[in-house]
Image (cartoon, rainbow, N blue to C red):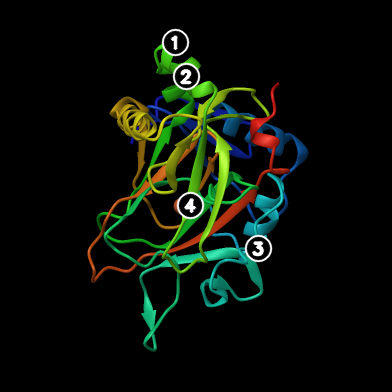
C-alpha cells in the first residue's frame, strides 16, 4: 500500500493518496472535536476517495470515536447485535473479535476464516451510508479488510448491461448468524446522496435474489455482476496497523475480511452510519 502524493492541510493533518483508491489521513487529533473546515475537507475526501485511512494518531476514546462519527450522520445503535458484543455504555460501537475471555466470546464476527463480501446492514430498509473500523489488536498476518469500488464497477458495465440493471431490484437477507433473520428489497443501483455518483448495490453475502427478472436469468445475472466486481482493478486491500481507523462509503463499496490464524488475536471497534431515511440512497439527483 503506497502513497503517491502528500498535501499539507492547514497544519492539522496530512493527506496521502492510496492506490487504486482511498486516501490516508495522518496525524488527526481526536481528543478535540473537528473544526468546521476540517470536517468539510474530510467529507470532500471521503466523497472523492471512498476510503479514508486515519493513521499516526492517539487512539480515540469510545466517546471521541462516537463524537467524530456523528458528524457523518446518525449512528446505528445495533439493536440486532448481542448486547454483550457492544462497548459498555456505547451501543454505537460493535466489538469485532475472535477473543474469548472467561469462556465467553467478547465480540461479533468471531470466525477467523474470513468474512465474505458484504455491505453492513444492506438487509435492512434503512441501509448504511458509511462504516468505520478501528484496530485495537491486530494479527501479525492476515485479517486484512478489502474494499471493492462499486461506482467503478457500475461505470465499467457495458451500456446494455447498465440499462438492464437500472430497472431491477434485489432482495438482501440475513439468516443464521448471531443477528436475527431479516430482509429488505432495494434497487440494484444506488446513488451517492452527496456526489450523485451511481453504484451497483449488490453484495455476495446478503444479496440472494434479483427481482423483476426471470428467476434463472436473475441467478445468472447476479453471478455475472459479482464476477465483474471481483476484478482486481476495483480492489483496495487494507493491511491493518495498530490504531488505524478506516472510514468508508457503504453506498459505493463492498468489503470483506481476509482469514487469519486461530491463535492470533484481533479486536476491532466498529461504528455504522445510517442513511438519512430508507429512500435516501435511491433518490434521483
Ligand atoms: Fe462489515
Packing grade of label 1 (10 A; few <14, some 14-19, many >=20) is: few
Q: Secondary structure at mark 2?
A: helix
Q: Earlier in the sequence, mark 1 or mark 2?
A: 1
Residue 258 point in image, percent of width and height? 30, 51
Q: Is residue 87 above or below residue 204?
A: below
Q: Is residue 35 above or below residue 32?
A: above
Is residue 129 something that shows in the picture?
Answer: yes
Pick out the residue farthest to the top.
159
Residue 83 point in image, percent of width and height? 57, 75
Q: Earlier in the sequence, mark 3 or mark 2?
A: 3
Residue shown at 47%/31% (left/top)?
16
Q: Which circle, 3 or 1, is nearer the viewer? A: 1
Q: Secondary structure at mark 1?
A: helix
Q: Which residue is mark 3?
A: 77
Disc 2: residue Cβ within 8 A of ligand 1's nearest atom: no
Residue shown at 54%/64% (left/top)?
94
Packing grade of label 2 (10 A; few <14, some 14-19, many >=20) is: few
Q: Which residue is mark 1?
A: 159
Q: Quadrant of the N terminus?
A: top left
Query: Residue 225 sits in which quadrant?
Result: top left
Horizontal side, residue 69 vs residue 209: left or right: right
Q: Which circle, 3 or 2, is nearer the viewer? A: 2
Q: Which residue is mark 2?
A: 164
Q: Quadrant of the C terminus?
A: top right
Amino acid at each position: 500500500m503506497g502513497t503517491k502524493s502528500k498535501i499539507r492541510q492547514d497544519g492539522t493533518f496530512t493527506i496521502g493518496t492510496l492506490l487504486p483508491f482511498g486516501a490516508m489521513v495522518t496525524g488527526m487529533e481526536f481528543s478535540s472535536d473537528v473544526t468546521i473546515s476540517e470536517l468539510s475537507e474530510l467529507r470532500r475526501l471521503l466523497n472523492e476517495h471512498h476510503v479514508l485511512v486515519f493513521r499516526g494518531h492517539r487512539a480515540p476514546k469510545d466517546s471521541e470515536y462516537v463524537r467524530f462519527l456523528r458528524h457523518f450522520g446518525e449512528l446505528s445503535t445495533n439493536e440486532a447485535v448481542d448486547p454483550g458484543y457492544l462497548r459498555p455504555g456505547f451501543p454505537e460501537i460493535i466489538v469485532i473479535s475472535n477473543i474469548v475471555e472467561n469462556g465467553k466470546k467478547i465480540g461479533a464476527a468471531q470466525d477467523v476464516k474470513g468474512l465474505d463480501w458484504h455491505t453492513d446492514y444492506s438487509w435492512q430498509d434503512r441501509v448504511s451510508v458509511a462504516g468505520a473500523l478501528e484496530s485495537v489488536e491486530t494479527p501479525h498476518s492476515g485479517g486484512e479488510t478489502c474494499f471493492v469500488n462499486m461506482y467503478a464497477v457500475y461505470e465499467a458495465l457495458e451500456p446494455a448491461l447498465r440499462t438492464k440493471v437500472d430497472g431491477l431490484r434485489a432482495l438482501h437477507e440475513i439468516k443464521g448468524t448471531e443477528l436475527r433473520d431479516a430482509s429488505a428489497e432495494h434497487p440494484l443501483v444506488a446513488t451517492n446522496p452527496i456526489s450523485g455518483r451511481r453504484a451497483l448495490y449488490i453484495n455476495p453475502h446478503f444479496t440472494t435474489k434479483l427481482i423483476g427478472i426471470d428467476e434463472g436469468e436473475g441467478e445468472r445475472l447476479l453471478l455475472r455482476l459479482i464476477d465483474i466486481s471481483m476484478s482486481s482493478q476495483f480492489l483496495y486491500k487494507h493491511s491493518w496497523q495498530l490504531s488505524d481507523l478506516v472510514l468508508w462509503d457503504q453506498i459505493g463499496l463492498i468489503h470483506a475480511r481476509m482469514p487469519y490464524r486461530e491463535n492470533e488475536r484481533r479486536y476491532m471497534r466498529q461504528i455504522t452510519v445510517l442513511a438519512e431515511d430508507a429512500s435516501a440512497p435511491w433518490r434521483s439527483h
